[in-house]
């Protein structure tokens, strides 16, 4: 089978190779999927650069959608041919960017949900929900999501709105209307952001979830939207947050894994009530393009590698209309 993997740590474009390997066999408690789509995320780049070092070679592609083609010992409630999606383990020789991948955790993919729309969900939804849990969001909360146009930010806005919270978010023009459709109040990022947020909120916001691209200026600006640095939680601007007294999700760690929310969001997405933007659907053979876009830090949505089916003729067309659905509440 084809698999995208690396044999030593380094810069992703220098070390990744698309090569042939034996398909993995599911261990007890696992399934194997014939992969239709996977994603490329900043986490894949970090793995290439040495995050969580372990046995080599290692694969990339940490979210998978496909159909079950092998079932490990002890697994029940699933059949060969079932459509599934979920997070791919990152410790084995292949991961999701392969013709076949094993899964420890999986969810049924609703028939109305396209593989690209399904595979965009796991990391964004779980990371966003963990952040909201750490912040203690309630229906009485006024939340600022810094970076609502990022995939995790897009998920956080929708999840917080579904909980009844008031949400203000920063975003560029590409996703502003979709975010407004959730009931969020949207303001541009950049100069004067803190003043605009305080004007919308009628004063300081209760809490901030920062998922914006790394930028040393972000945390100082966000501090002007709250009354206490501890009201800010970031998943992306870690060093400035630690220096200035804000919270970061990696230091605190999750309260608990929130895989339960992923399945719920998949059903909502199939019904047109939830979605994560997909920026590009790119054939596996053109994986370098996906890596380059991810390294830009502003890809405009999830980057999806098409594995098992022919890609859309226009691979650069945004994936709205291919299962993304509406984000209206």
Image (spheres, rainbow, N blue to C red):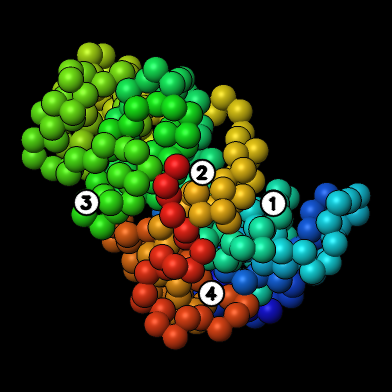
Question: Which mark sits nearer the N-terminus, 3 or 4?
Answer: 3
From mark 3 to mark 4, how far is it between C-alphas?
Answer: 27 Å
Tags 4 and 2 in contact by the CB under 8 Å rule?
no
From mark 1 to mark 3, how far is it between C-alphas?
Answer: 32 Å
Mark 4 sits on what residue? Answer: 306
| Secondary structure category for the residue under label 2 | helix
Q: Of the numbered discs in the image, which one, if any, rests on residue 172?
A: 3
| Secondary structure category for the residue under label 4 | strand
Q: Check the picture and name the quadrant holding the C terminus.
A: top left
Count neighbours of disc 3 (C-alpha within 10 A) and say few if under 14, some if 14 to 19, many if 20 or more: some
Mark 2 sits on what residue? Answer: 125
Question: Which mark sits nearer the N-terminus, 4 or 1?
Answer: 1
Residue sitting nearer the eye, 229 or 27: 229
Question: Which mark sits nearer the N-terminus, 1 or 2?
Answer: 1
Q: Height in image: 265 above or below 300?
A: above
Mark 1 sits on what residue? Answer: 107
Tags 1 and 3 in contact by the CB under 8 Å rule?
no
Q: Is residue 149 left or right of residue 155?
A: left
């Amino acid at each position: 089978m084809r698999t995208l993997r690396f044999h030593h740590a380094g810069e992703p474009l220098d070390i990744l190779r698309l090569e042939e390997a034996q398909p993995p066999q599911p261990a007890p408690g696992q399934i194997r999927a014939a992969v239709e789509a996977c994603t490329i995320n900043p986490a894949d780049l970090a793995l290439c650069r040495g995050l969580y070092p372990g046995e080599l070679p290692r694969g990339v592609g940490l979210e998978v959608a496909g159909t079950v083609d092998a079932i490990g010992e002890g697994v029940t409630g699933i059949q060969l041919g079932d459509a599934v999606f979920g997070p791919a383990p990152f410790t084995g020789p292949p991961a999701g960017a392969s013709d076949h991948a094993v899964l420890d955790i999986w969810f049924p993919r609703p028939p109305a949900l396209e593989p690209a729309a399904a595979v965009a969900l796991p990391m964004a939804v779980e990371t966003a929900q963990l952040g909201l849990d750490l912040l203690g969001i309630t229906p009485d909360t006024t939340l600022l999501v810094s970076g609502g146009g990022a995939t995790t930010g897009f998920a956080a806005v929708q999840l917080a709105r579904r909980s009844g919270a008031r949400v203000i978010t920063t975003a560029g023009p590409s996703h502003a209307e979709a975010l407004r459709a959730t009931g969020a109040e949207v303001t541009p990022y950049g100069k004067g952001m803190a003043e605009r947020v305080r004007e919308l909120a009628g004063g300081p916001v209760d809490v901030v979830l920062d998922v914006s691209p790394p930028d040393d200026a972000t945390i100082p600006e966000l501090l002007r939207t709250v009354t206490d640095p501890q009201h800010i939680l970031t998943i992306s601007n870690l060093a400035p947050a630690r220096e200035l007294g804000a919270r970061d999700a990696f230091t605190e760690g999750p309260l608990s894994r929130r895989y339960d929310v992923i399945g719920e969001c998949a059903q909502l997405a199939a019904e047109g009530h939830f979605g994560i933007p997909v920026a590009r659907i790119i054939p596996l053979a053109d994986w370098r393009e996906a890596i380059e876009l991810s390294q830009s830090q502003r890809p405009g949505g999830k980057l999806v590698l098409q594995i098992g089916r022919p890609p859309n003729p226009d691979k650069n067309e945004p994936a709205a209309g291919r299962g993304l659905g509406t984000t209206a509440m």
